[in-house]
Image: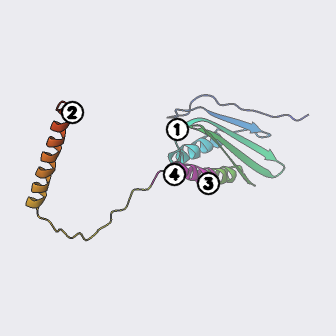
């Protein structure tokens, strides 16, 4: 029968706005291990969006120490694993992978927007002066007024 020791930490750590659950399998989680994992997680938070929930699972299988971080960010679940011979090194490896995934997630959110159109410098030859343009605009307005007056006049019956 496999005995799993779970240490669930539901209290909020200092300056945390989301719950952090720490689970230990085949390992007694010490306060320095908790503090190290939470400290690394809070530093990695700057890459991502709003973290809703965090689960840290620490496990020992023979000589391999593994750490799993599962984060719910906005509407996405990110899971990373770090495996080494030392628990602290496993936490560092998992956090490095987490930061890489958060960077990719952040880039994916912002890269899909349309790129701004580039400005193009063109040489334009001006043929008409401003006075000619004003005269042409006046003629167009007069023609439009004549057209409107014709439309408003009663129709002639022949």
Query: Distance from label 2 to label 3 (Cα)?
Result: 90 Å
Which sits in the foreground, 58 or 81? 81
In the rendered image, which residue does mark 4 sit on? 112
> In the image, which is nearer the foreground, mark 1 or mark 2?
2
Number of residues whose C-alpha sits closer than 10 Å to that of mark 2, classed few (under 14), some (14–19) or many (20 or more): few
**What's the magenta region?**
97-114
Q: On the rendered structure, is 58 left or right of 76? A: right
Mark 1 or mark 4, which has the lower sequence index? 1
Number of residues whose C-alpha sits closer than 10 Å to that of mark 3, classed few (under 14), some (14–19) or many (20 or more): some
Mark 2 or mark 3, which has the lower sequence index? 3
Q: Is residue 35 magenta?
A: no
Which structural element holds mark 2? loop
Mark 3 or mark 1, which has the lower sequence index? 1
* Residue 13 to residue 86: above or below: above
In the rendered image, which residue does mark 3 sit on? 96
Query: Distance from label 4 to label 2 (Cα)?
Result: 66 Å
Q: Which mark is residue 50?
A: 1
């Amino acid at each position: 029968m496999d005995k799993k020791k779970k240490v669930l930490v539901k209290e909020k750590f200092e300056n945390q706005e989301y719950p952090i659950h720490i689970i230990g399998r085949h390992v007694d989680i010490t306060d320095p291990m908790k503090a190290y994992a939470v400290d690394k997680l809070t530093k990695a938070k700057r890459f991502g969006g709003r973290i809703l929930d965090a689960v840290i699972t620490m496990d020992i299988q023979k000589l391999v120490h593994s750490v799993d971080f599962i984060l719910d960010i906005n509407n996405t679940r990110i899971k990373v694993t770090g495996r080494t011979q030392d628990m602290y090194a496993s936490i560092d490896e998992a956090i490095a992978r987490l930061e890489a995934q958060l960077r990719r997630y952040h880039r994916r959110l912002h890269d899909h927007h349309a790129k701004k159109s580039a400005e193009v410098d063109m040489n334009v030859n001006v043929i008409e002066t401003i006075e000619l343009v004003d005269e042409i605009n006046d003629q167009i307005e007069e023609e439009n007024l004549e057209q409107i007056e014709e439309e408003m006049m009663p129709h002639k019956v022949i």
